Amino acid sequence: MFDTEREIIESKIRLCLDCGKCTVVCPVAQHDPEFNPRLIAQRRLSQNSHSPQDETIWQCISCYMCVERCNYYVKFPEFIHGLRAEALAEGAQLQCTHGGALQALQHMMAREDLLQDRLSWLPQDIELSEQSDTIFFVGCAPYFDIVFSDLEVNTLKGVEGALRLLNRAQIPFNILANERCCGRDLLLQGDREGFLALAKANMQEFARYGVKKIITNCPECHYTLKVDYPNVLGDTGIQVMHLTEVIAPLVQSGELSLGELEKRATYHDPCTLGRCSRIFDEPRQILRAVTGLDVVEMEQSREKALCCGASPWVYCGAVNRQIQDQRLTQATATGADILVTTCPKCQIHLRCAQKSRDGKIPQVEIQDLAFLAARSLDIGGESVG
Amino acid sequence: MNKSAIHLVVFACNWDGLSCIEEAARGGLTYPASVRVVRVSCLSRVHQGLMLKAFELGADGVMLLGCEPGNCQYDIDAGLVTREYEKARIVLGLLGLGKERLVLCHIPRGDGPGFVRRVTDFIKELEQVRPAIPARA
């Protein structure tokens, strides 16, 4: 279970040399001089650590850029998550984005007696194997598409694309009708109690169906189920794979061929899939397997990819918007028609920036990788266009 | 919260919505004590986050009580609240709690008996649907 002091030690923050490289690469620090990872560490580790409360801890976007640069791989974001848990325990109030709708949703999803009705979107032609011990973990996409309907996001298209690719590759899988949110956002904002409730509810659901393997399309679900659940609950005995890890080898070996799409696309590495899970090549292998698709890289990509600029539904402001603008500008500079990502949250955050700027910001199309791959095969769920 | 009663949160706009509730009080009309009224300047201030928060805290139903079309004091009318109401309803459906737990009402200004009737009818409907939602521990 959780022990904040132990977590802070395990983040290796005491190895901090005070060199400031983290601050140089931190996208938040670049736009906000008040935010300084090195000084946050210094303030917390100094003698008078507890007063007053450090307000800047809420601005970290957990992009792991600092970890990438740190000579000692100090896990600064995990140190921050520990500080947030401490702050919440001391009565800090979260500044929730979107009116706290996501937090309310996550807390309600943690109820044990919940019986969701969340599969009405599932297209008839998707073949499920009810006996299979492999499941596809859908994540919060059905909820996102409603909560963010005014942003005109369609994160379910990515999920549908993923399911169609799995069907095409003849990989059997089932979907659980009552899966919960993986809880990553609650974990990142320091709400340990909420995270644990969701994790336990999900584990009960997995046990009930004898789940042995999980495939996800959302990088956050992937990392949480694969790394955070075992960290907190002990070994789960479940193998967790990201869709790109399943599809890329099939594409490489020629067992699965993709279609054609005459477009130029650039791939945006979601922080959680890239820097956290170290999955950089697989998404690119899939994109390159699409005939006619011109794949170009942005100024910052792979390990150095810029974050989509937002936090786990807390504390979003002008700085976050500047980061999003910067990322969209990088995408446009490549001349790409499509910005491809695998994360529904990246889609939401970048789309939010596009929408709020009312056409004054690059309107590059944002698409999920799985949807694009399925679309190239004419199985994306809509006509090619 | 005592879970034997149906807990209802009413978001009432400061103008026509609240005037109905005040009129009910002035007329000595009664309605269950488990109805909590939250006064807001305009229903357009109530977004899906607040509606869902009420359910998270253990409400069995939420009523949005606002002005009739054309009566909005801020010229916004029901546009914003309708959008948020529709979203929250679909989310409640996905969660399996049931869309019918959230209602949007426009009652004529100062209609106390109308408000009491709507509230008691809504409570009766909620008693029919499903067992009360357990509040978060």
Image (spheres, coloured by chain):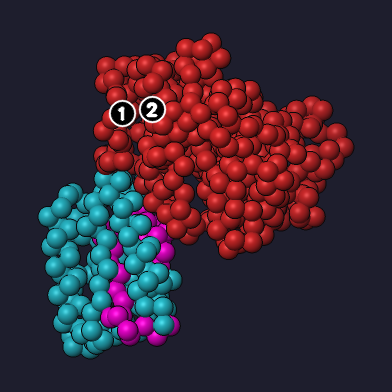
* Cα distance between the residues tagged 2 and 1: 7 Å
In the rendering, at what x and y percent does residue B39 appear?
Answer: 37, 76
Q: Residue at x 59, y 61 (%)?
A: A359
Same chain, labels 2 and 1: yes
Q: Nearer the viewer, residue A288 or A355?
A: A288
The x, y position of residue A178, in whole percent, is: 31, 35
Neighbor class of circle 2 (other Cα within 10 Å; few <14, some 14-19, many 20+) is many
In the foreground, A286 or A264: A264
Residue range (magenta): B46-74
To which residue does mark 1 refer?
Answer: A126
Checking the image for residue A164, the label placed there is 2
- Please rate how many residues cluster around mark 1, counting C-alpha atoms within 10 Å: few if below 14, some from 14 to 19, many from 20: few
Label 1: chain letter: A
- Residue A79, percent from left and from top: 68, 37
Is any atom of residue A117 visible in this view? Answer: yes
- Disc number placed over residue B8 in the picture, else none: none
Mark 1: which secondary structure?
loop
Callout 2 secondary element:
helix
Q: Position of residue A226 (x, y in %)?
A: 51, 24
Q: Which chain is cyan?
A: B
Task: Tell me the residue at 42%/25% (across/down).
Answer: A165
The chain letter corresponding to red is A
Label 2 sits on what residue type? Arg
Q: Which residue is drawn at the image coordinates 17% and 64% (left, top)?
A: B123
